Amino acid sequence: MKKDYITIPLKEIRRRKLRSWLTLIGIIIGIAAVVSLITLGSGLKNAIEGQFAALGNDKLFVSPKGNTFSPGLSIDAVSINDDDLKVVERVQGVRRATGFATTTGEVEFNDISRYFFVWGQSTDPEDRELIGESQNYKIGVGRVMEKGDENKVVLGWEHSQDTLFEKAVELGDNIVVQGKKLTVIGFLEKIGSPPDDRSVSIAIDTYEDLFETKGELGLLIVQTEPGEDIDVVADRVQKDLRKARGLAEGKEDFNVETPRQLGAAFTTILDILQVVLLGIAGISLLVGGINVMNTMYTSVLERTKQIGVMKALGARNRHILTLFVVESGLYGLGGGIIGAIIGIGFAKTVELLMQTFVGPAFLSISIDTSLVLGTLTFSFVVGCLSGIAPARQASKMSPVDALRYE
């Protein structure tokens, strides 16, 4: 009899192939959405955590509160300046510190004008090294800026392609930034982020002349001494900066953040987004469950005489109930298996496309076995729950009435 709990429902599902596939669609869509969204979300988290882990445990970031860029991108923007940099450099536990400024600027080449992020950076070798480590910038072609390169520029990778100016920029070419002609001396390696791959990096002195932002910076990068607790140093930086800027505790107009804090902020946003998307996917599962229930009610009506025969041969109510619950559970499990395969396939396809067109650093997917098993169990349970009401109806049928049913 126990074997019949599986063979009979499978036989009925195969006998009504079209209806079975239509019943599975809702479950398939819901499970595929759940698996793909969770997998992609986890992949993004892994990539973000990897990026921030690569920064190391010895770097802090100081930025104006509410404005991560230099003045010029927002009205009445609070700024970080050279005086703040000097304060930070004197903090106990700080090994070195530097800063850079960023805003949008007009860039002209091949008689085409576009706007990109323009970065003003120190040409000091140590400062340049610290910025490169924190921003993951590496020279792909040419060289970095050095002292005396006030009329030179380093461009992001995409400038070396023909997508921005209908002609690739080459080493030695002249481009015009905010009306000033600059010579290209290098291109960064491809990062995969459009703002970075289209960036324009110039000497900080040149930047200040072009954008009239003497001493103003958008971000400070701070490296701690070896063996120092980064959280303790962050508290010291915040305290000294607050004192230097004449601010009360809790009224800071700047942020001091560690890579761990920055990573946590990004993952929190991803978690919220994932919950919203999973809620939408859950609607598909609800529709799928209702579809299974509808199919099972129809199946009960079509098999009324069969139910009567089974009861006449000695089947009890619990046997009939189990048969129909198992059948509805198999609908859920079947939809779950197909949905999981589609969801994983979709996630891997997105990963491949991201690696091909954006870069490997932005998505790192790994298949979570517990996720797959959990979703299959969940889809089976959804199927079983959807079939309980029709199964109860079938189990309570009178064998005499069932045999008379036409």
Image: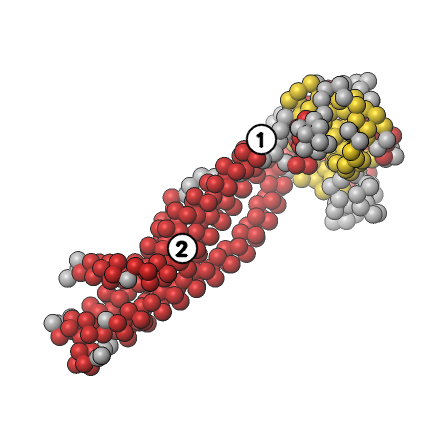
Coordinates of residue 288 in the picture (x, y in percent): 41, 62
Checking the image for residue 313, the label placed there is: none
Q: Amino acid at mark 1?
A: Ala
Disc 2 is placed on an element classified as helix
Depth check: 244 or 195 in front?
Answer: 195
Coordinates of residue 99 in the picture (x, y in percent): 75, 31
**Which residue: 62% across, 31% down?**
191
Depth check: 178 or 64 in front?
Answer: 178
- Which numbered disc, 2 or 1, marks the residue closer to the eye? 2
Q: Is residue 357 left or right of residue 162?
A: left
**Which residue: 38% across, 44% down?**
369
Residue that lies at the very extreme toward the left in this rendered image: 313
Q: Is residue 16 above or below residue 184?
A: below
Coordinates of residue 218 in the picture (x, y in percent): 77, 37
Q: Which residue is mark 2?
A: 28
Using the rendered image of the protein, determine whether residue 221 is visible from the camera's viewpoint.
no
